[in-house]
Amino acid sequence: MSKSNILEDVDPFVGSEPMDVVVPQGLASKWFFPKPLIGNTHPGATLPFGMVSACAYTGGYPTGYGRWGKCLQGVPATLDDAKRGRGFTHFHPSGVGAIRKYYNYARVVPLTDAMGGLDAIDKPHKLENEVARPGYYACELNGTGITAELSVTSRGAVHRYTFAQDCEAMIAIDFSHGGIAIEDGQTIPLRGNCTTDGINTAQSDVVLEGVSLCTAATLRNYEDEPVAQLWEDGQILEDQEDLSYHYIRPSTFKPFGVLFTMPVKAGHQLELRLGFSLRTIRKARKNQPTRRFEVTAQRAADRWADKLGAIEVEGGTEAQRKVFRTSQYRCLVKPCEARDESPFWPWDGPFYFDMSTMWDMYKTQLPLALSLYPDFGRDFVNALLNIVEIEGNFPIGYRMARGFDRFAHQASALSHVTIADALTRGIDGIDWERAATVMAGDISRGGTGEAFVHQGIVHPITHTLDLAYGCYCTARIAQHIGDDRLYAQMAEKAAYWKNAYNPETGLLQHSTFYEGGKWNYSFRLLHDIPGRIALSGGAEPLITQLDQFFGFEGEPAPRVGLTPSVEELEAGYRMHRFEGLCNEPDMEVPYIYAFLGRHDRVCDIVREGLKLFTPTPGGMVGNDDSGGMTSWYVCSAKGLFPVAGQDLFIIGSPVFERSVTHLPGGDFIIEAPGTSDTCRYVSGATLNDQPLDQPFLRWAELLGGTLRLTMSEQPGAWGTAVTAAGH
């Protein structure tokens, strides 16, 4: 497939509107969808793992784009009857929920004298004729005669504004802007300063959420020399070329920025080039784009085509191919790469931020990224090791803000899993001695870690599972470096997972749970599947519980709508059902059937789940969570699901007749002739022309390997003889 065809299948608008599949059918009707039924994505321009994004600003939740308000459950409420922009902002979350820091910095607003000039900086204009593709966003601002186009570089953005009529054109930059239009959603700078040369450049250094954001702006492609003026609170500051603020608070805050003004002829295009740095103004100037807009946009497209070309697919429906490519695109939006730009330590080297939902990303998004892009894996792991040394803990969520421990209540020891994944994939350039040291130290850190280490159990009970799994992952690193003592210590504590369960029910003990209940967390793909099966009294009792969980014999689950009541939510939770890919706590659970001799169940659940994704703005089941959910789609549609932290991949039911994954050690090919929604079951398999009777592969088997699956319309014997030994 050509690079242009790959990009044509990507639709950045997918996920920006509420879910299209209002009433799921078939097996999916038995699943309970309690969380927001919208992807919470934006169509803005960005690069793969890009530090900078640029998009229209409407104030919508949570990205600053769209017409939807804050939503924690069900269908989101509308902020407006249409998307109305108030300029264009930079730095955006992707697919998240209430993370409290919503970025949307350095707002740029094109204006004219006919619009009212600077007085119109906050006036909304309907976004029309929007266009988005990887690395590019464009729209028209209704009633203004202005067309806006945005693209990005690794550390900057280029805006191009076309004015339809002769006018006095203006481009305002609000350096003080941050946040979105919800309660407690605004970011007020702590300190700030900005300067201008009075002609075509300006720069600012503004402290936002504890991070210094330095911006350098240059206006290009003007005909008559422009005038640059600073402004404050909507008023031009005549003959003033610098502003400085200290200890700003909401009661003293006044917006500030720069205004460029110049006459233009009808059809003229102005370019604004912005460079950003999280360290210094000097670096921001150095980071300014140097190429024309069309060159910048093409280079961005080329980078996307190169990254997305790591997987080739043939077959499937047009809709499936579009959803696949769009999902693959979403997997690469986060985390944000900012090498040599860490605001938290002084030395250069790898730095990543915006792992705002690492409790979701670690399951599928990060394993997929580490598999395809080993250079990313090396730098990301080294960045994690820097974070734990500087901040004292591995991050659970890591935003473009200080306060890394904001999410510590949600999970534990997630970075341990990602580091173990790097080991599985043989990624070079990581100091494994250093990794083992900080991983072991992190296990016992804080009250949660101390309770786990000394008592063998801690509440919320899911943290017991997290920390036990973190010990397993640390034991893998210890074994790799030959530290037998550390290996023994960690292996012993890895067995503490059993303490989290009630042996009488085979489910987790009673506890508090984050976004779900004990059923949603009871069926993880643990490092001791034989022990997990034994705890339930054998495979059959566990299968019975799983069948109940997925609703094979049950009644349809209730649907929640706009602002669901407590009673509605409780009624759904009492059914103890799968959250239907509306949320990630149980998204890996369909694959546990593979260990129980019921690969047909894997195929049925995964296939029904894949149907919930569509190539439309409402094509996501729930929040994408920085690629956490769309990476599930990529892995499941391809037919190979990674077990995070382990050297284990589970064969599923591929929707494509052929896929080629370009891995660093050789291409991995999956062939599934005749596969379709009805022909979904695997009845036979070979790996490199040798019979394969179990639905599991190891990393080494993927490198240069060819998996050929025979697909059937009815379940067969393949995979039924699998026991826990397959693990």
Image (cartoon, helix red, strand yellow):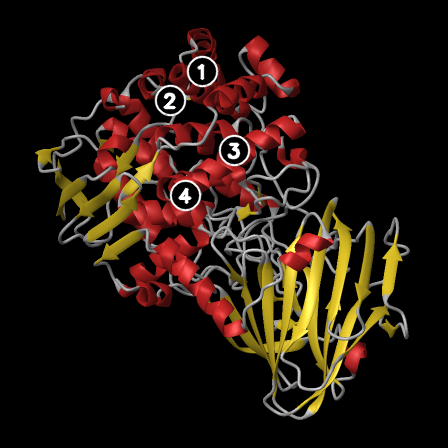
Is 629 rendered above or below residue 323?
Answer: above
Residue at point 88%, 48% (across, down):
247
- Residue type highlighted by circle 2: His
| Mark sitting earlier along the chain (1/2) | 1
From the viewer's perspective, is the residue at label 1 or at label 3 nearer?
Answer: 3
Q: Which residue is mark 1?
A: 494
Which of the numbered marks, if any, corresponds to residue 382? 3
- Residue type highlighted by circle 1: Ala
Mark 1 in CB contact with mark 2 (< 8 angstroms): yes
Which of the numbered marks, if any, corresponds to residue 369? 4
- Residue type highlighted by circle 4: Ala
Which of the numbered marks, if any, corresponds to residue 247? none
Q: CA distance from mark 2 to mark 3?
A: 25 Å
Corner quadrant of residue 194? bottom right
Corner quadrant of residue 595? top left
Q: CA distance from mark 1 to mark 2?
A: 9 Å
Helix, strand or loop at disc 4?
A: helix
Q: Position of residue 460 (x, y in %)?
A: 58, 25
Is 13 rendered above or below residue 569?
Answer: below
Mark 1 in CB contact with mark 4 (< 8 angstroms): no
Q: CA distance from mark 1 to mark 4?
A: 26 Å
Q: Which residue is mark 2?
A: 527
Corner quadrant of residue 355? top right
